Image (cartoon, rainbow, N blue to C red):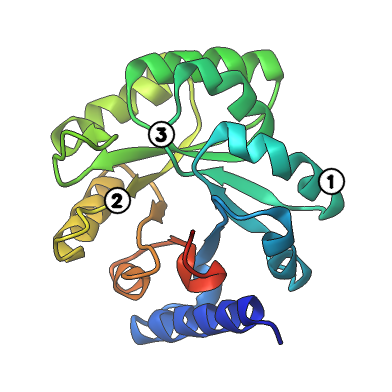
């Protein structure tokens, strides 16, 4: 086995253990394998294992490698997990199946227009800035309910979940708990939270999607 295969299998086992610990099934958790900065040659071993859900940060980079991979591996779903500039919305709608970083009205308005134009069904998560970090994307936690209503009511967008990226130097637990509370009171079933360093904690606190890159693909250069 190559190291990517070994790492992938290890991550899947850890997901299963974390799910069992919290009384859940591993099938309740979707692993979003974060392939940003990695070439198709690095991604293909994971596709060959049958994995079909991947995450990318940048629209431009994704367009250079994913159209061919999606054509070669049927059923592949691609998540945008990085900030989306409104001038890249059309390309994003064309390529991605899920956008996890909806966080402002201008983007909601542009997405609504492009989704309608493309005639495509697109799943959206709202990104919440649980740490109130000024340099980080995401709607403020105290504005999340109102923003969700705007997205689904005014713009008729299909919002199915919430996403967050806790401050890297803080305990993620209160951030995951906050996100889960926001999602629950709004009747949203999906929670994208947890990365390579904390996905087991996220699963125990209700994550349905975990975004894991380096633990599978290795450190980025």
Of helix, strand and loop, which one carries label 2? loop
State whether residue 155 appears in this view: no
Q: Give percent across and percent down for residue 93.
A: 62, 27
Residue at figure coordinates x 42%, y 20% from the top left: 108
Residue 79 located left or right of residue 131: right
Of helix, strand and loop, which one carries label 1? helix
Of helix, strand and loop, which one carries label 3? loop
Q: Give percent across and percent down for residue 152.
A: 41, 25
Q: Give the alpha-carbon distance from disc 3 to disc 2, as whole Å.
A: 12 Å
Which residue matches tag 2?
165
Residue at figure coordinates x 27%, y 55% from the top left: 180
Residue 155 lies, with reference to residue 7, above or below; the image says above
First in residue order: circle 3 vs circle 1? 1
First in residue order: circle 1 vs circle 2? 1
Q: Give the alpha-carbon distance from disc 1 to disc 2, as whole Å.
A: 31 Å
First in residue order: circle 3 vs circle 2? 3
Using the rendered view, name the quadrant where residue 148 is placed.
Answer: top left
Which residue matches tag 1?
71
The quarter of the image holding the N terminus is bottom right
Which residue matches tag 3?
83
Q: Label 1 neighbourhood size at 10 Å, few (<14), some (14-19), many (20+)?
A: few
State whether residue 59 appears in this view: yes
Residue 197 located left or right of residue 11: left
């Amino acid at each position: 086995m190559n190291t990517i295969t070994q790492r992938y299998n290890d991550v899947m086992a850890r997901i299963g253990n974390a799910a069992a610990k919290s009384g859940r099934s591993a099938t309740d958790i979707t692993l979003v394998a974060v392939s940003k900065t990695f070439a198709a040659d690095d991604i293909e071993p994971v596709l060959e294992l049958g994995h079909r859900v991947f995450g990318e940060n940048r629209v431009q980079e994704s367009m250079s490698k994913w159209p061919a991979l999606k054509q070669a591996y049927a059923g592949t779903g691609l998540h945008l997990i990085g900030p989306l500039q409104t001038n890249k919305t059309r390309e994003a709608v064309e390529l991605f199946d899920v956008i996890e970083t909806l966080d402002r009205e201008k983007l909601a308005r542009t997405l609504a227009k492009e989704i309608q134009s493309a005639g495509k069904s697109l799943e959206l998560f709202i990104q919440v800035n649980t740490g109130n970090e000024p340099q980080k994307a995401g709607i403020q936690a105290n504005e999340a309910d109102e923003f969700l209503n705007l997205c689904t009511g005014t713009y008729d967008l299909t919002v199915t979940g919430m996403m967050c990226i806790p401050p890297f130097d803080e305990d993620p637990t209160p951030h995951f708990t906050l996100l889960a509370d926001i999602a629950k009171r709004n009747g949203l079933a999906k929670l994208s939270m947890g990365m390579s360093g904390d996905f087991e904690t996220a699963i125990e606190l209700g994550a349905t999607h975990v975004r894991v890159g380096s633990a599978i693909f290795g450190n980025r250069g």
